[in-house]
Structure formats: structure tokens, C-alpha cells
């Protein structure tokens, strides 16, 4: 997204100092979700030219929003919407869907689809599902949101014989599978640290190179067949993955 886009329709008419009107306008842009947490603001010079105000006015508005914790400055990088201080704790002891996780925390889950369709299996997908390379599989990629905050990127692949109409999948993949009588019974997850590339960071509304948690989930049905491969990228400024451990009786 062009970083100037959310500011094009700003109306600075009204009473009071101009910098305070600009401050309120920027805060409103953020409050209505046009700028997500971690998103960059245009440089002061560009914002001043776009709005027809002086750089001093822009600087004062940004300074007040920074002091109030709405914005944050990063030396050599620019000004960004401050990241939220509240974090999501994700237990690892139970297989749940993103939709269930968000609803359990009182957040409204939604998705923005990036890709849904049937494609020839890649060598990795073919090896995971035990099928021949090029066999038709379903792929679903989306941005996952919790109450309009982008939380994660999710890329899922499934065998084509259990998901032959990926474009019909709604908010919950597991609900769509359940309608077909298919239920994942267990999963293996591998968690690694990574940094987001330019495209991933832009989709999640954070600076390029931001740290993230990559989770590779392989899901199995009751018969032990692999029915899901999902690679997700979770914002590490929001997510904590929590494991509950018990002590062994062995000394």
C-alpha cells in the first residue's frame, strides 16, 4: 500500500492550532484501522507537501503523538504506528484453529485471502503427502486478523481428494473439513525463528526485517494419513508460544 494513501482525504478544517488538528486527524486514521500497528508514516516532508502544511506543523503533531505512545520513532528508519503492548499467549498442548484461538480471547477473527485454488504439488508437498509430484492439491494462503489487527500469514496445502473446492472454504478451514467428515486428530509442529521479507512485512503491517515465528504444522487424520501442511508466520511482537511441561519421575 502507498504510505500516503490513508492521508489523502484528511480534512484539517476547524478551530484550534493547526498542529493539534493534524494530530487528531492522524490519530483518527490509526483508530479506524487505515494504518495498522507497525505501519510506517510518510516522511515529514512528504506529509507536509501532501497536506499543504509546514514541516514544523507535521513535526509538532508527530512529536505529541510519539510522547503519548501512539507513534514511535526509529533512528534512521522513520516514524511508525506503535506496536501494541498486549500479547497473545498460544498454548501448544492442544490442536486448535486460529478462529477458535481468537474467539477464546474475545477477538473477532477474519481473513483476507491471498490465494485459493488447485495446483500441481511441489516436490515438498508431494513428499509430505506421499503422492507423485504434480498431483493436484489445494492451496490456501491468507492473512489472519484478530479484531482488525494482522496477526499471521498462513499458507496451507491439502490433498486434492479431500479439498477439491478450496474457493468455497470460509473463515475456518477445520469447519470446512468437518462438513466433509474429515477431522485432524493430531499434528506435529516445528517452530523456528525468522525475519520477514519485504512482502511478508508489508502484508503484516510491520517493518521489513521484523522478527517472526514460523510454525510448520503437519496434520494427520485418525488413520495416520497426512491431510494438512500449514506454514504460518506469526508476528513475534504479539505472539508468545507457551508449552506446559511436567517433570519426569526419573532422577
Image (cartoon, grey):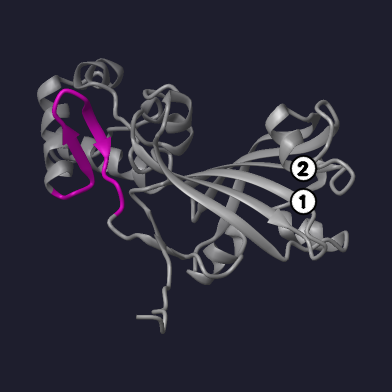
Horizontal side, residue 44 vs residue 164: left or right: left
Horizontal side, residue 171 vs residue 16: left or right: right
Is disc 1 surrounded by few (<14), some (14 to 19) or many (20+) residues within 10 Å?
many
N-terminal label among 1 and 2: 2
What is the distance, in whole Å, between disc 1 and disc 2 at their CAs?
Answer: 7 Å
Q: Nearer the viewer, residue 61 or 190?
A: 190
Q: Which mark is residue 129?
A: 2
Q: Nearer the viewer, residue 17 or 243?
A: 243
> Which residues are the magenta region?
68-84
Mark 1 lies on residue: 227
Horizontal side, residue 99 vs residue 234: left or right: right
Residue at the spot 26% in from the left edge and 35% down from the top edge: 80
Horizontal side, residue 99 vs residue 66: left or right: right
Residue 211, horizontal then vertical, whole percent = 34, 39
Q: Secondary structure at mark 2?
A: helix
Residue at the spot 61% in from the left edge and 60% down from the top edge: 99
Residue 94, horizontal then vertical, whole percent = 57, 69
Amino acid at each position: 500500500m502507498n504510505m500516503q494513501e490513508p492521508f489523502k482525504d484528511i480534512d484539517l478544517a476547524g478551530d484550534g492550532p493547526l498542529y493539534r488538528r493534524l494530530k487528531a486527524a492522524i490519530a483518527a486514521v490509526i483508530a479506524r484501522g487505515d494504518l495498522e500497528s507497525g505501519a510506517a508514516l510518510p516522511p515529514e516532508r512528504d506529509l507536509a507537501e501532501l497536506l499543504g502544511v509546514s514541516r514544523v506543523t507535521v513535526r509538532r503533531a508527530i512529536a505529541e503523538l510519539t510522547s503519548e505512545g501512539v507513534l514511535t520513532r526509529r533512528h534512521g528508519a522513520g516514524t511508525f504506528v506503535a506496536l501494541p503492548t498486549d500479547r497473545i499467549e498460544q498454548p501448544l498442548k492442544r490442536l486448535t484453529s486460529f478462529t477458535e484461538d481468537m474467539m477464546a480471547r474475545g477477538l473477532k477473527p477474519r481473513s483476507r485471502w491471498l490465494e485459493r485454488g488447485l495446483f500441481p504439488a511441489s516436490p515438498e508437498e508431494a513428499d509430505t503427502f506421499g503422492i507423485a509430484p504434480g498431483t493436484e492439491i489445494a492451496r490456501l494462503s491468507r492473512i489472519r486478523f484478530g479484531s482488525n489487527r494482522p496477526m499471521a500469514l498462513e499458507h496451507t496445502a491439502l490433498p486434492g481428494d479431500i479439498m477439491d473446492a478450496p474457493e468455497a472454504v470460509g473463515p475456518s478451514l477445520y469447519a470446512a473439513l468437518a462438513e466433509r467428515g474429515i477431522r485432524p486428530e493430531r499434528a506435529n509442529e516445528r517452530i523456528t525463528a525468522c525475519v520477514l521479507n519485504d512482502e511478508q512485512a508489508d502484508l503484516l503491517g510491520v517493518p521489513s526485517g521484523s522478527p517472526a515465528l514460523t510454525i510448520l504444522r503437519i496434520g494427520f487424520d485418525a488413520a495416520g494419513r497426512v491431510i494438512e501442511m500449514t506454514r504460518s508466520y506469526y508476528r513475534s511482537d504479539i505472539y508468545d508460544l507457551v508449552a506446559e511441561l511436567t517433570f519426569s519421575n526419573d532422577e
